[in-house]
Image (cartoon, rainbow, N blue to C red):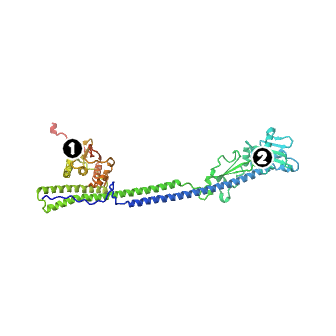
Amino acid sequence: MRPSIPAPAAGKAAPLDRSGSPLSRPAVGTTLLVGFVIGTVGLASWLAWEAVDAARSHRQAAEEALADYAEVAAWESSRLTLESVDRVLDNVFDDVPRYARWSDLSDLDDVDRELDDAARDEGCVCPGIHSPTALFAVRGDEPVQIRPAGALEAAEVQTLRDEIRAHSEAGADPGRHGLLVRDAAVVLYAVTRDRGGAERALYGVVMTLEALGELSAGWYRDRTLLPPAVAGDTPQDSLVRVRLTTPAGDVLVGDGDAGPSAFTARSVLPPRFGGLVVEASVLPAAADRLVIGGLPRSRLPLLLGLLALTAGVGVAGLVEVRRHQQLARLREDFVSSVSHELRTPLTQIRMLAELLEDDKLRTPEERARSMRIIRREAQRLTMLVENILQFARTRASGPLPPPASHPVDVEPVVREAVALMEATAAQDDTRIEVDIEGQPRIQGLREGLRRIVGNLLDNALKYGPAGQTVRVRVASHGHQVRVEVTDQGPGIPAAERTSIWEPYRRLPRDVEARRPGSGMGLAVVRELVDASGGSVAVEAAPGGGARFIVHLPAAAAPAEAPPSPAAVG
């Protein structure tokens, strides 16, 4: 009776998802890492927000302090201006009320003399003050006095008189003297009145805006506008910029740039003093001296950069851990697949060896069949072990060295590899056709070529249908030798034609179908081809199936032997 040779029992595998990953393996590490990354980014965001808010509050407090200093400087500047203008007016017209008390009126010569004294008292050379545009006096019904003669027309004096009257009466203290700004001129005036308040006389000095600017230039030179406890010994012009302008904006003292509006304060003098405007600006460069810690710069770009860096490091860590988990899962699947691949042939070899040892295979045909099966399964084991050892050596010592320089005939190596796989092919009624054009030769790599062809044939036989025809074609193409292995299986999807060369990588459909395989054969093929300086690819075969194409460097053609002397003779 012919003994039956049972197939090895397949162990019960864990359920798999569509990608081939076991469903029973929860990604606890990934979940924890995602939570950690989210928590880290959230904490970093909160800290960044607190830092930005603190910096904003600090900057706001510093700006408010500088604005307050500008207010102090503007107030002090306006006080100095009021005192100085009032002092000049007193000096110019000090004889007018004195003479008026004795029923006498000042002469224009007295006003002109007092004008020179006022300029000297202010310490100003002031050519515009010593030579005013015009002096005039209006005394009741007396003729109008004008100096120099012809400097003003009578009608102009009457217009000035009306404006001065209105200006004097509009003031809060309509009295002795004042300052009127009109067009490009300044008028210093004094009005004397009798006991009943009626006007007795009006005196005026007309000068240019430049003359008033010359007079007022020294009012802030030696005065401190900020408290000494704040300014210390720092020069005034290094802390504050002061500008004196007319209501129309004409600059009398200072330049046209009043400084940053955030640190600028304005003070308007009373109408009796021409409504002059004093502007005081704290220089941004003085912030370090006036505010502890200076004016802080925005740190938002730095904080955003650090936040982005934190998020990037977290995401990179997440990706790296995820990659290691995938690699660990692939290795676990590899160990499981290899264990199954080893158990199947070992079971058959052991069983058939026991049958032979117990002499239970009585007929020559049974013993011959058993020996063929043992040989076939031993070849499968050898190929699997070789692939594992090859992959392990590559990972331990780096890329393979280049092949030896001696030429190798391709045909005998290919036919040897095909012969080793014929027993496996015959099990599924598969035919292997070999077509070799010419006598191609490659540079070294004899054992590597055998393993390349063997792995490609094993792949074609493993995943192709029973009864198929596998074709091996070898031909020379210029400086390369092209090796093709074509099967009639389901083919390789276009999206997977790159990933199949990676270690442990198997197609999801093969994992789901529980097809045997370790995911090592094609990875070893690529390593061997890369070491030789060749290339490998896969494409769809005509009529279905997959065509694996390997290009290997061809060996140089053998040099022709020189003719013998006898032949030459």
Residue at x 49% of width, y 54% of height: 305
Q: Is residue 530 above or below residue 7?
A: above
Q: Nearer the viewer, residue 282 or 125?
A: 282
- In the shown orientation, is residue 143 left or right of residue 273? right
Outermost residue to the top: 569
Q: Position of residue 400 (x, y in %)?
A: 29, 53
Residue under label 1: 435
Count residues near mark 1 (Cα–Cα under 10 Å), then give few for <14, some for 14-19, many for 20+: few
Residue 550 % position (x, y):
27, 46
Could you tell me how many numbered marks the image carries? 2
Query: Please, is residue 186 above or below residue 365 in the view?
Result: above
Residue 244, x across and y down, in percent: 70, 48
In the drawing, does residue 296 fall left or right of residue 492? right
Circle 2: residue type: His
Q: Amino acid at mark 1?
A: Asp
Q: How packed is label 2: few (under 14 Cα within 10 Å), some, or many (20 or more)?
A: some
On the image, the x and y values in percent for residue 371 come to 16, 56
In what element is the residue under mark 2?
A: helix
Q: Which residue is mark 2?
A: 167
In terms of image quadrants, where is residue 183? top right
Counting residues from the start of the chain, the first of labels 2 and 1 encountered is 2
Q: Are marks 2 and 1 in contact (CB under 8 Å)?
A: no
Q: Quadrant of the C terminus?
A: top left
The label shown at residue 566 is none
* Residue 460 drawn above or below residue 569: below
In the displayed orientation, state which residue is furthest to the bottom: 358
- In front here: 496 or 99? 496
Q: Secondary structure at mark 1?
A: strand
- Which residue is painted at 32% across and 49% down in the image? 496
Indicate left or right for 555 with 101 as reference: left
- Spatial separation of the CA atoms under disc 2 and disc 1: 119 Å
| Residue furthest out toward the left | 363
